[in-house]
Amino acid sequence: MLTFDARPVRTGGFRLAEGPVWDGPRERLLWVDIDAGLVHEGRLRPGRVEVVRRHRLPGPAAAVACAADGRLLVAGRYGLTVLLPDGTRRAGARVLPQGAPARLNDGGCDPTGRFLVGSAALDGRRGADILVRLAGDGRPRPLDTDLTCSNGLAWSPDGTLMYSVDTGAGLVRVRGYDPATGRAGPRRDFLAVRGGLPDGLCTDRDGNLWLAVWGAGEVRCHAPDARHLATVRVPVAHPSSAAFAGPGLDTLLISAGGPDGGLFAVRPGARGAPLPAWDGVSR
């Protein structure tokens, strides 16, 4: 098994850094600081990430996606917000009812740009969090309703498999997926995580998963048959997600929570695939 060490490229000043996204056409890195309600835009520089712009939301900022024209879709506490390039905000779909003891959590776009997002309970309840797919009419279509902290989402390179994380259950699950319709098949357990909790994840061009393990200080790479291929050691305890970034998509950017969290980077010899742009409709 291969082992790599990630180095810090942006640390300090974050409450819960999460959800890195590489916007290739604009060569910018996007990520959120959930509890601070901030969406960050950054540039990759040698050995560091430079923050060039921040967007503040009135509540949590749980996940971000980017449209082809540069608009951003942000998951807030109960619903979605569209950020225009000039900074204007527009309300998107409501996913959770006002006053629900939960907030939205990790989200991402499927191979044709539909946005999916899950929830995380704030009151300690188990087995009642959801994962939904947003449709063009703004209505959320549920995929799962029995999760305990819905988390990372990723697809196989051909788009026919969808991976999702149930953090409280300690599981990564997989199901068949039809990119043309967004229809998802029955789920099955793909990986039971030990020594920490599964959080965010991404896939590379070979279909391997790169999974942030909260509490373990690691990002673990697993083959499509779940074999453990590599470990990236992160010098903090709580890595939260990962994404391939840079012009060659060969830098793994890792977000981490906690007082010593931030962004970390490593080149593990793998390359990601360009992320699909948000379709601009499923909001």
Image (cartoon, grey):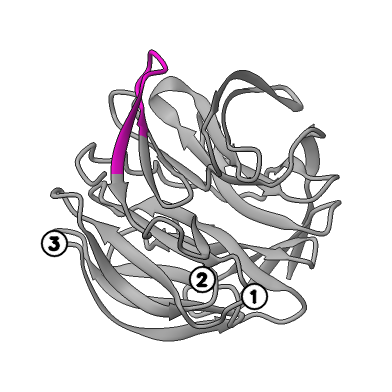
Residue 119's label in the rendered image is: none
Quarter of the figure with residue 85: top left
- For disc 3, the marked residue is 181
Quarter of the figure with residue 31: top right
SS state under label 3: loop
Q: Which residues are magenta?
A: 82-92
User: Is 91 within the magenta?
Assistant: yes
What residue lies at 79% left-to-right and 67% top-to-bottom?
A: 216
- Mark 1 and mark 3 lie on one chain; the one further toward the N terminus is 3
Residue 225, given in percent of the width and then of the height, sits at 49, 80
Give the left or right position of residue 122, taking residue 138 as reference.
Answer: right
Out of 209 and 54, give the one closest to the viewer: 54
- For disc 1, the marked residue is 228
SS state under label 2: strand
Give the quarter of the figure containing the N terminus. bottom right
> How packed is label 2: few (under 14 Cα within 10 Å), some, or many (20 or more)?
many
User: Is 119 within the magenta?
Assistant: no
In whole angstroms, how far apart are the C-alphas of marks 1 and 3? 32 Å
Does residue 207 appear in this view?
Answer: no
**Pair 1/2: label in front:** 2
- For disc 2, the marked residue is 165
In this view, 171 is above or below 237: below
The kind of residue on which mark 3 rests is Thr
SS state under label 1: strand
- Mark 1 and mark 2 lie on one chain; the one further toward the N terminus is 2
What residue lies at 85% left-to-right and 45% top-to-bottom?
A: 260
Residue 221, given in percent of the width and then of the height, sits at 62, 65
The kind of residue on which mark 1 rests is His
The kind of residue on which mark 2 rests is Val
